[in-house]
């Protein structure tokens, strides 16, 4: 990939790694950094070597939020002309599963980035928060929408209006993270989980993610029709034939992505 200023990327064993890399600023997100993250997600999405993407933060924190110095003098016209959240919208189009490994501070835009992931594994010291109201603004990259869909109107409104810090145990209780681990085991556990997904047939993984995401927005009937079409499509894949043949022959399947 091209030289990156605010993130680090690599590929190993089918996993595409993206590390937020502004540790002195607690990985505060400026516009260029977001663009680098999204462009790397898209590049990994198109790379046949990559089966799953792992997003994490270098240094002490995952991300303490948006770069307020960059935004302090913004105005509505500038935000409209620059299409402030266009890059964020592109995250929704990533087909491969994205695992977030989060720790310490996951605030504001960092919280929104975490909620854009398909899975979240959190260190036990993690704190989540939307502090935007204390700055006279509000979440704008999907925070009010994603959190409400995950935890319901009342808790989302409570947390966003109070700017309360939510610990990892509470996050697990309300179902917006998958697992809590000791801080020193965060990357090990996240990589182990990523490897499990990387071993699965890529097309099935892609269509399962797509179908589950549709379930959030569609009616039950519409979602089931969407699911059924994806189920049928998989019977045209080589991996379906290999998977079922391997089951009958009592051996491990060798998936190729075809």
Image (cartoon, rainbow, N blue to C red):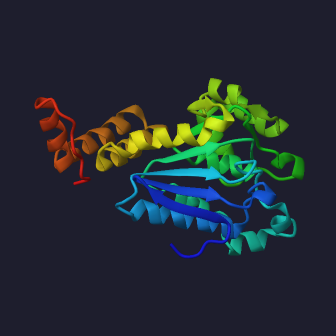
Residue 253 place in picture, x, y as percent = 21, 40
- Horizontal side of 241 relative to 60 (left or right) equals left
The residue depicted at 67 percent of the width and 30 percent of the height is: 171
Residue at image point 82% right, 38% down? 161
Q: Nearer the viewer, residue 193 or 80?
A: 193
Q: Position of residue 149 (x, y in %)?
A: 59, 37
Towards the viewer: 162 or 182: 182
Q: Nearer the viewer, residue 120 or 199?
A: 199
Q: Residue furthest top?
A: 173
Residue at point 40%, 57% (across, down): 50
Q: How many marks?
A: 0
Question: Is 8 left, or right, of 215 in this rendering?
Answer: right
Res 146 → quadrant: top right
The quarter of the rendered structure image containing the C terminus is bottom left
Instruction: Report whether residue 237 is seen.
Output: no
Q: Please tell me whether residue 179 is drawn above or below residue 68 in the rendered image.
A: above
Q: 209 above or below 174? A: below
- Residue 31 in the image, given as x and y percentages of width and height: 70, 68
226 left or right, relative to 66: left
Identified at 20% across, 43% down, the residue is 232
Residue 85 placement: quadrant: bottom right
Question: Which x, y percent locates residue 230?
Answer: 28, 44
Asked whether residue 208 appears in the rendered view, the answer is yes
């Amino acid at each position: 990939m091209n030289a990156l200023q605010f993130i680090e990327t690599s590929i190993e064993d089918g996993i595409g790694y993206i590390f937020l890399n502004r540790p002195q600023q607690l990985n505060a997100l400026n516009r260029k950094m977001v663009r680098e993250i999204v462009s790397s997600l898209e590049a990994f999405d198109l790379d046949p070597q990559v089966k799953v993407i792992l997003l994490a933060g270098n240094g002490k924190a995952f991300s303490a939020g948006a770069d307020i110095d960059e935004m302090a003098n913004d105005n509505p016209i500038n935000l409209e002309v620059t299409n402030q959240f266009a890059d964020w919208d592109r995250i929704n189009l990533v087909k491969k599963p994205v695992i977030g490994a989060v720790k310490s501070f996951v605030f504001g835009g960092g919280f929104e980035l975490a909620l854009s992931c398909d899975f979240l594994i959190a260190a036990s010291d993690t704190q989540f928060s939307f502090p935007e109201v204390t700055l006279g603004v509000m979440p704008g990259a999907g925070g009010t929408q994603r959190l409400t869909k995950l935890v319901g109107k009342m808790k989302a409104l409570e947390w966003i209006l109070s700017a309360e810090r939510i610990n990892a145990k509470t996050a697990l209780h309300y179902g917006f993270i998958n697992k809590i681990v000791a801080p020193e085991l965060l990357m090990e556990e996240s990589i182990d989980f990523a490897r499990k997904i990387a071993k699965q047939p890529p097309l099935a993984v892609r269509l399962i993610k797509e179908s589950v995401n549709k379930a959030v927005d569609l009616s039950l009937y519409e979602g089931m029709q969407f699911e059924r079409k994806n189920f049928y499509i998989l019977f045209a894949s080589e991996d379906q034939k290999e998977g079922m043949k391997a089951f009958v022959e009592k051996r491990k399947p060798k998936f190729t992505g075809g």
